[in-house]
Image (spheres, rainbow, N blue to C red):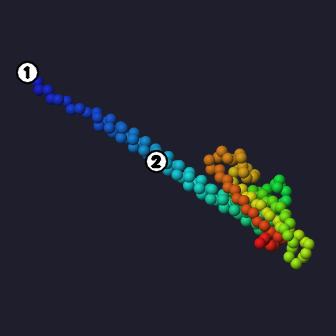
Amino acid sequence: MNHIVFPRRQSGFAYIAAVVLLVVVAGLSVALLRLTDVQQTTVNQAVLAARAGLAARAGIEWAFHRPADRCTDTPQAQPHHLADFRSESGFLVSVRCTFRTYNEGETPGTAGTALKKRIYRIEAVACNGSGTECPDNGSVPRPDYVERSRVATMCMMNANDFCT
Protein backbone atom coordinates (compact mmCIF):
# COMPACT_ATOMS: atom_id res chain seq x y z
CA MET A 1 0.00 0.00 0.00
CA ASN A 2 1.20 3.31 -1.04
CA HIS A 3 0.76 6.11 1.41
CA ILE A 4 0.54 9.59 0.17
CA VAL A 5 2.45 11.97 2.39
CA PHE A 6 1.21 15.49 2.43
CA PRO A 7 3.67 18.20 3.39
CA ARG A 8 2.96 19.49 6.86
CA ARG A 9 2.06 23.17 7.20
CA GLN A 10 4.45 25.24 9.21
CA SER A 11 3.01 27.13 12.16
CA GLY A 12 4.29 29.13 15.11
CA PHE A 13 5.75 32.16 13.34
CA ALA A 14 2.57 34.15 13.86
CA TYR A 15 2.81 33.55 17.62
CA ILE A 16 6.35 34.93 17.76
CA ALA A 17 5.38 37.97 15.71
CA ALA A 18 2.37 38.62 17.97
CA VAL A 19 4.51 38.44 21.12
CA VAL A 20 7.10 40.83 19.65
CA LEU A 21 4.34 43.22 18.60
CA LEU A 22 2.80 43.12 22.09
CA VAL A 23 6.18 43.83 23.72
CA VAL A 24 6.78 46.81 21.39
CA VAL A 25 3.30 48.23 22.03
CA ALA A 26 3.71 47.79 25.79
CA GLY A 27 7.08 49.55 25.69
CA LEU A 28 5.62 52.47 23.74
CA SER A 29 2.72 52.69 26.20
CA VAL A 30 5.08 52.85 29.18
CA ALA A 31 7.21 55.52 27.45
CA LEU A 32 4.13 57.64 26.70
CA LEU A 33 2.90 57.33 30.28
CA ARG A 34 6.27 58.45 31.63
CA LEU A 35 6.38 61.35 29.18
CA THR A 36 2.91 62.43 30.28
CA ASP A 37 4.00 62.25 33.93
CA VAL A 38 7.10 64.36 33.24
CA GLN A 39 5.04 66.93 31.35
CA GLN A 40 2.52 67.17 34.20
CA THR A 41 5.34 67.64 36.73
CA THR A 42 6.88 70.35 34.56
CA VAL A 43 3.59 72.20 34.29
CA ASN A 44 3.03 71.96 38.06
CA GLN A 45 6.53 73.31 38.73
CA ALA A 46 5.95 76.21 36.33
CA VAL A 47 2.67 77.11 38.05
CA LEU A 48 4.28 76.93 41.50
CA ALA A 49 7.20 79.05 40.29
CA ALA A 50 4.85 81.72 38.95
CA ARG A 51 2.91 81.77 42.22
CA ALA A 52 6.14 82.02 44.23
CA GLY A 53 7.30 84.93 42.07
CA LEU A 54 4.02 86.74 42.68
CA ALA A 55 4.23 86.07 46.42
CA ALA A 56 7.76 87.54 46.49
CA ARG A 57 6.51 90.56 44.58
CA ALA A 58 3.73 90.97 47.15
CA GLY A 59 6.41 91.01 49.85
CA ILE A 60 8.17 93.84 47.98
CA GLU A 61 4.88 95.75 47.74
CA TRP A 62 4.27 95.20 51.46
CA ALA A 63 7.63 96.82 52.29
CA PHE A 64 7.09 99.65 49.77
CA HIS A 65 3.84 100.57 51.51
CA ARG A 66 5.53 101.95 54.65
CA PRO A 67 9.31 101.54 54.35
CA ALA A 68 10.07 103.84 57.28
CA ASP A 69 8.20 101.45 59.61
CA ARG A 70 9.47 98.22 58.08
CA CYS A 71 13.12 98.92 57.33
CA THR A 72 16.14 99.18 59.56
CA ASP A 73 19.63 100.58 59.11
CA THR A 74 21.11 97.32 60.42
CA PRO A 75 21.77 94.84 57.59
CA GLN A 76 21.88 91.94 60.07
CA ALA A 77 18.35 92.63 61.33
CA GLN A 78 15.93 89.70 61.32
CA PRO A 79 13.63 89.55 58.30
CA HIS A 80 9.88 89.96 58.58
CA HIS A 81 8.03 86.68 58.00
CA LEU A 82 4.68 87.30 56.39
CA ALA A 83 2.77 84.25 57.58
CA ASP A 84 -0.51 85.66 56.26
CA PHE A 85 0.59 84.75 52.76
CA ARG A 86 0.95 81.09 53.71
CA SER A 87 -2.70 80.70 54.66
CA GLU A 88 -3.86 82.45 51.47
CA SER A 89 -1.40 81.15 48.87
CA GLY A 90 0.61 78.34 50.45
CA PHE A 91 3.79 80.43 50.35
CA LEU A 92 5.73 81.92 53.23
CA VAL A 93 7.36 85.26 52.41
CA SER A 94 10.43 86.53 54.23
CA VAL A 95 11.21 90.23 53.71
CA ARG A 96 14.47 91.87 54.66
CA CYS A 97 14.50 95.64 54.31
CA THR A 98 17.49 97.86 55.01
CA PHE A 99 18.41 101.44 54.25
CA ARG A 100 21.37 103.76 54.21
CA THR A 101 21.18 107.51 54.61
CA TYR A 102 23.24 109.77 52.36
CA ASN A 103 23.76 113.52 52.40
CA GLU A 104 23.47 114.97 48.93
CA GLY A 105 23.89 118.69 48.49
CA GLU A 106 21.62 121.09 50.33
CA THR A 107 17.91 121.23 50.93
CA PRO A 108 16.40 123.80 48.52
CA GLY A 109 15.62 127.10 50.23
CA THR A 110 17.61 126.35 53.37
CA ALA A 111 21.27 127.20 52.96
CA GLY A 112 23.61 124.96 54.88
CA THR A 113 21.08 122.20 55.61
CA ALA A 114 22.13 118.88 54.08
CA LEU A 115 19.65 117.11 51.82
CA LYS A 116 19.25 113.64 53.33
CA LYS A 117 18.27 110.75 51.10
CA ARG A 118 17.53 107.20 52.14
CA ILE A 119 18.25 104.36 49.76
CA TYR A 120 16.09 101.36 50.69
CA ARG A 121 17.03 97.84 49.64
CA ILE A 122 14.15 95.38 49.91
CA GLU A 123 14.63 91.65 49.38
CA ALA A 124 11.67 89.28 49.47
CA VAL A 125 11.99 85.51 49.32
CA ALA A 126 8.91 83.33 48.87
CA CYS A 127 8.91 79.56 49.30
CA ASN A 128 6.43 76.76 49.82
CA GLY A 129 8.53 74.98 52.44
CA SER A 130 7.24 73.79 55.77
CA GLY A 131 9.75 75.79 57.82
CA THR A 132 9.37 79.14 59.53
CA GLU A 133 11.50 81.17 57.13
CA CYS A 134 12.64 81.34 53.54
CA PRO A 135 14.85 79.98 52.16
CA ASP A 136 13.92 76.69 53.82
CA ASN A 137 16.92 74.39 53.53
CA GLY A 138 15.03 71.49 55.12
CA SER A 139 12.43 71.46 52.33
CA VAL A 140 14.83 71.76 49.38
CA PRO A 141 14.93 67.98 48.70
CA ARG A 142 11.16 67.87 48.18
CA PRO A 143 10.28 67.55 44.49
CA ASP A 144 7.56 70.22 44.74
CA TYR A 145 9.67 72.81 46.63
CA VAL A 146 9.79 76.20 44.93
CA GLU A 147 11.58 79.35 45.98
CA ARG A 148 11.74 82.76 44.30
CA SER A 149 13.51 85.93 45.33
CA ARG A 150 12.96 89.54 44.32
CA VAL A 151 15.07 92.58 45.14
CA ALA A 152 14.06 96.21 44.75
CA THR A 153 15.58 99.55 45.69
CA MET A 154 14.00 102.92 46.16
CA CYS A 155 15.13 106.35 47.20
CA MET A 156 13.16 108.67 49.49
CA MET A 157 13.96 112.14 50.82
CA ASN A 158 11.51 111.90 53.72
CA ALA A 159 8.58 109.71 54.67
CA ASN A 160 6.51 110.78 51.65
CA ASP A 161 8.77 112.05 48.88
CA PHE A 162 10.57 109.84 46.40
CA CYS A 163 13.91 111.04 45.13
CA THR A 164 14.02 112.75 41.79
Q: Which residue is mark 2?
A: 32
Out of 139 and 5, give the one closest to the viewer: 139
The answer, for residue 92, to whether it is visible in the render is no
Q: Is residue 93 left or right of residue 36?
A: right
Q: Which residue of the protein is positioned furthest toward the left in this rendering? A: 1
Residue 91 sits in quarter? bottom right
Residue at 75% from the left image edge and 63% from the top image edge: 153
The answer, for residue 41, to whether it is visible in the render is yes
Which SS class for mark 1? loop
Q: In x, y percent, where is residue 67?
A: 80, 65
Mark 2, Cα crowd under 10 Å, few <14 / some 14-19 / many 20+, is: few
Q: In x, y percent, where is residue 117?
A: 83, 67
Q: Amino acid at mark 1?
A: Met
Residue at 73% from the left image edge and 65% from the top image edge: 61
Residue at 66% from the left image edge and 45% from the top image edge: 141
Q: Amino acid at mark 2?
A: Leu
Circle on res. 1: 1
Q: Is residue 137 left or right of residue 102?
A: left
Q: Which residue of the protein is positioned furthest toward the top in this rendering? A: 1
Q: In x, y percent, where is residue 112?
A: 91, 72
Residue at 64% from the left image edge and 59% from the top image edge: 51
Earlier along the polypeptide chain: callout 1 or callout 2? 1
From the viewer's perspective, is residue 43 above or below residue 120?
Answer: above
Out of 106 and 41, give the one closest to the viewer: 106
Residue 123 sits in quarter? bottom right
Q: Which residue of the protein is positioned furthest toward the right in this rendering? A: 112
